[in-house]
Image: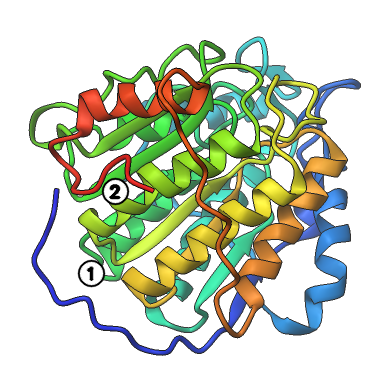
């Protein structure tokens, strides 16, 4: 997966874009549904003290051409027809209210425009505070609260409209992004790296899922058992994500930023803290500065505890807005037999020959 270009170091001038819009609250779900509008109110609380430093990027509905880079025409037709009968369940988890189809287009359009602003250098980095999430949406199917695959649509728009060659998608949502993986699994120009609770919904994302055809090796899954906490996540980022990014050399990084691995989240069984997210965001910031001029866009996925959304968003903002890179966490030890050691051994067994330094501190 490596390429040969010089690793030039240049100072990165910081600027951060933000997409948010009250229309995202208009995606209505039944009482008690976890993907509720007030998720964004928790995100807004974290944003409040940073707004003076953020550049507003307006939300725009994605058009059919953008959506069709990932989704089948039949999927767009199905969503349009379902919207006329709303409110309606698309599956057991995914609800379409009267405004939801248009709000889902706004989410996809926001991911596209934020990513393009980052690629063009209008802003160095950015956050799309959007809903509904997207990474479960398949080419022909809405699922897992997701209608359109926001991050996948953004990645293809970067390649089609901005001439970006290599895009790395980091998915740290607690659920595996099956739709994102399947969108690119035969494409070596988009590397998908996922940390997720396993076994768990949607059932995909095992170690051996590595892509297919020309894309073999450009899918890196790091399934983690329930109970994994800061040490496991930070250790995976230090010992796996860092060498993968340095080998792949992305031109832009996109983060499917779900905050549902937080210890308070009601839909999962992980134990990541605010400090854990701060460490993860610090590593991503350093890698983006090092490899692609700081160009990284964070696109909101899941997160169903207000505390997790606040702490995770704050971690991203603080790492992104610092004039100098934040300090990196102390390297996590991974002796054989520990949870982290076992996970590293499994990933090394699958990908060890593809990425120099994989597994090293």
Above or below for 308 versus 228? below
Tell me how the rendering is colored. Answer: rainbow
Most foreground residue, 132 or 294 = 294
| Residue 136 seen from this side | no
Name which residue lies at 31% across and 84% down: 9
Element type at mark 1: loop
| Residue 193 occupies quadrant | top left
Of the two numbered discs 1 and 2 on the same chain, state the one appearing first in sequence: 1
Name which residue lies at 28% across and 45% down: 191
| Residue 333 seen from this side | yes
| Residue 188 occupies quadrant | top left
Q: Is residue 162 left or right of residue 75?
A: left
Q: Which mark is residue 186?
A: none
Q: Is residue 297 left or right of residue 158?
A: right
Query: What residue is pinned by disc 2?
Result: 244
Q: Nearer the viewer, mark 1 or mark 2?
A: 2
Name which residue lies at 39% across and 79% down: 120
Q: Name the spot of residue 195 as percent of width and height, x first.
A: 48, 33
Query: What residue is pinned by disc 1?
Result: 163
| Residue 192 occupies quadrant | top left
Name which residue lies at 8% across and 66% down: 4
Whole-number angstrom distance, CA of label 1 to CA of label 2: 22 Å
Most foreground residue, 103 or 117 = 117
| Label 1 crowd (10 A; few <14 / some 14-19 / many >=20) | few
Element type at mark 2: helix
Q: Name the spot of residue 268 as percent of width and height, x first.
A: 70, 21
Most foreground residue, 19 or 58 = 19
């Amino acid at each position: 997966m490596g390429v040969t270009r010089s690793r030039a170091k240049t100072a990165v001038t910081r600027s951060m874009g933000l997409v948010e819009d009250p229309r995202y609250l208009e995606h209505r779900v039944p009482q008690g549904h976890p993907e509720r509008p007030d998720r964004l109110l928790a995100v807004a609380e974290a944003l409040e003290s940073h707004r003076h430093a953020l550049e507003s990027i307006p939300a725009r509905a994605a058009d059919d051409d953008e959506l069709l880079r990932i989704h089948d025409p039949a999927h767009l037709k199905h969503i349009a027809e379902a919207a006329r009968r709303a409110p309606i369940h698309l599956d057991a988890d995914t609800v379409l209210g009267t405004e939801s189809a248009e709000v889902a287009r706004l989410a996809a359009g926001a991911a596209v425009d934020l990513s393009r602003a980052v690629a063009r250098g209008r802003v160095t980095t950015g956050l799309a505070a959007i809903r509904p999430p997207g990474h479960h949406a398949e080419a022909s199917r809405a699922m897992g609260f997701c209608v359109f695959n926001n991050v996948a649509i953004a990645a293809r728009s970067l390649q089609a409209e901005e001439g970006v060659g290599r895009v790395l998608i980091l998915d740290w949502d607690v659920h595996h992004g099956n739709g994102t993986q399947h969108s690119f699994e035969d494409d070596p120009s988009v590397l998908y790296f996922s940390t997720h609770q396993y076994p768990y919904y949607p059932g995909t994302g095992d170690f051996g899922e590595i892509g297919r055809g020309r894309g073999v090796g450009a899918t890196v899954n790091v399934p983690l058992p329930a109970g994994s906490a800061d040490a496991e996540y930070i250790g995976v980022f230090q010992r796996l994500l860092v060498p993968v990014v340095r080998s792949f050399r992305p031109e832009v990084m996109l983060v499917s930023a779900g905050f549902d691995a937080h210890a308070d989240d009601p839909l999962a069984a992980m134990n990541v803290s605010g400090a854990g997210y701060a460490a993860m965001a610090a590593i991503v910031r350093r890698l983006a500065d090092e490899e692609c001029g700081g160009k990284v866009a964070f696109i909101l996925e899941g997160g169903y505890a207000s505390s997790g959304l606040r702490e995770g968003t704050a971690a991203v903002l603080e790492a992104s807005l610092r004039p100098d890179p934040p300090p990196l966490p102390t390297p996590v030890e991974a002796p054989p037999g520990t949870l982290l050691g076992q996970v590293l051994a499994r990933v090394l067994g699958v990908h060890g020959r593809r990425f120099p330094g994989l597994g090293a501190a």
